[in-house]
Amino acid sequence: MLVMAMSDAGSTQSTDLLEVYRLRKWFRAKRSILEVLQGRDEHVVKAVDGVSFTVKQGSTFVLAGESGSGKSTIARLILRAIEPDDGRIVFAGRDVLSLDKAGMRWFRRNAQMIHQDPYSSLNPRMRVISIVGEPLEVHGVGKVEREEMVLRALQEVRLEPVEEIAYRYPHMLSGGQRQRVAIARALVLKPMLIVADEPVSMLDLSVRAEILELMQSLKVRHNITYIYITHDLSTARYFGDTIAILYRGRIVEMGSIDDVLHDPLHPYTQALIDAIPEPDPSSRLREKVIRIRSHPGEEVDDRGCRFYARCPYAMDVCRDEPALVEVKKGHHVSCFLYK
Ligand SMILES: Nc1ncnc2c1ncn2[C@@H]1O[C@H](COP(=O)(O)OP(=O)(O)OP(=O)(O)O)[C@@H](O)[C@H]1O
Ligand SMILES: [Mg+2]
């Protein structure tokens, strides 16, 4: 439970910064030609289907899972870019979904986003100084103070020489430099939470580690809390404290990075880990060799375990819905193998 005192400046004494309860977002997708011919009704995508988790202040919470598992939808719901069908979001002790106008301003300042694509996320017609200064302008910071804060933020993300970079346009920067600008823009308002949706997946391998290392050092220096979205478990291992593995809109496993990656319980997590290239052949991770059954062509049943059709251990009971239960301290799994 959350016990805290907080001021408008955003200082908290709690351990939990963000709590998400039974978040749900279903999309009504267009029917495919096949579905039209078959006379089938509207196709519903259960992008996020009853997701609950807690993020501790100052920690990095990783959301991992394959493409389409609902990672970005959760990010957009948390930041209120889209509204959930159901569920509750509590941020620094305040119910995000019922904030008034002033409350939303406070929330927008304190919850920032870094996008995947540094090429499309920055306005090409704006100079770096305006891109990074824009959120400050929105929040009413005057010009002189704004410039000072922008230059300091550029320094923090190590974009040197700062005075020169500040007057460049995005097309004059490399991918890594652009992502540093995006980080400076997220950082400039001194937020409590930064949601980073695949922040390095579009960058060259050589700059990925640098950017993650920068984000890590900023986290320590400013006590930032991150939600780090990735399908790459090797960066999750470096960067995360806690991890939730998503499969088709549901969390199938959740726990500390060490527990989940060294002792994966869910067959889907085991398969994901098996897909990580492992530099150390003696690692315990190597022993977890498992194959996922190939995905059946037909629509997968939404009742019961979502992984049923692909699971090598599927049992009759898996036609029921498995609950996410704590099987070891802090290690939760949604699988009947652990009943
Ligand atoms: N606006 C929308 N309308 C209809 N369907 C949507 C919409 N946004 C997302 N979806 C669907 O919801 C599901 C989850 O999408 P989401 O983008 O959250 O996945 P993801 O885990 O972020 O995937 P990726 O790794 O590819 O970014 C997908 O099936 C997607 O097609
Ligand atoms: Mg995504």
Image: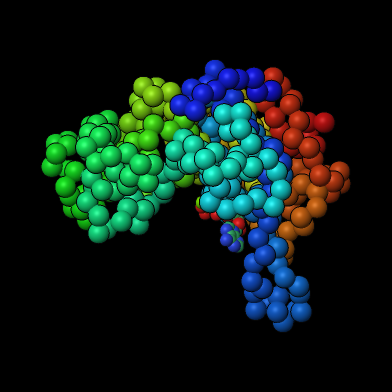
Taking the image as drawn, is residue 79 in sight?
A: yes
Residue 243 at x, y percent in the picture = 57, 32
Quadrant where the N terminus is found in the figure: top right
Q: Is residue 314 above or below residue 217?
A: below
Q: Residue furthest top?
A: 13
Query: Looking at the rendering, which quadrant does residue 37 occupy?
Result: bottom right
- Quadrant of the displayed image that contains ligand 1: bottom right
**Viewer-closest of 67 and 129:** 129
**Viewer-closest of 318 and 314:** 318
Residue 205 at x, y percent in the picture = 33, 43
Query: Looking at the rendering, which quadrant does residue 158 occupy?
Result: top left
In the displayed structure, does residue 165 sit left or right of residue 255?
left
Q: Residue at x 74, y 35 (%)?
A: 324
In the displayed structure, does residue 276 sit left or right of residue 246?
left
Q: Residue at x 29, y 43 (%)?
A: 133
Residue 116 at x, y percent in the picture = 41, 49
Q: Residue at x 36, y 27 (%)?
A: 218
Q: Is residue 65 above or below residue 120?
A: above
Q: Residue at x 44, y 43 (%)?
A: 113
- How many numbered marks appear? 0
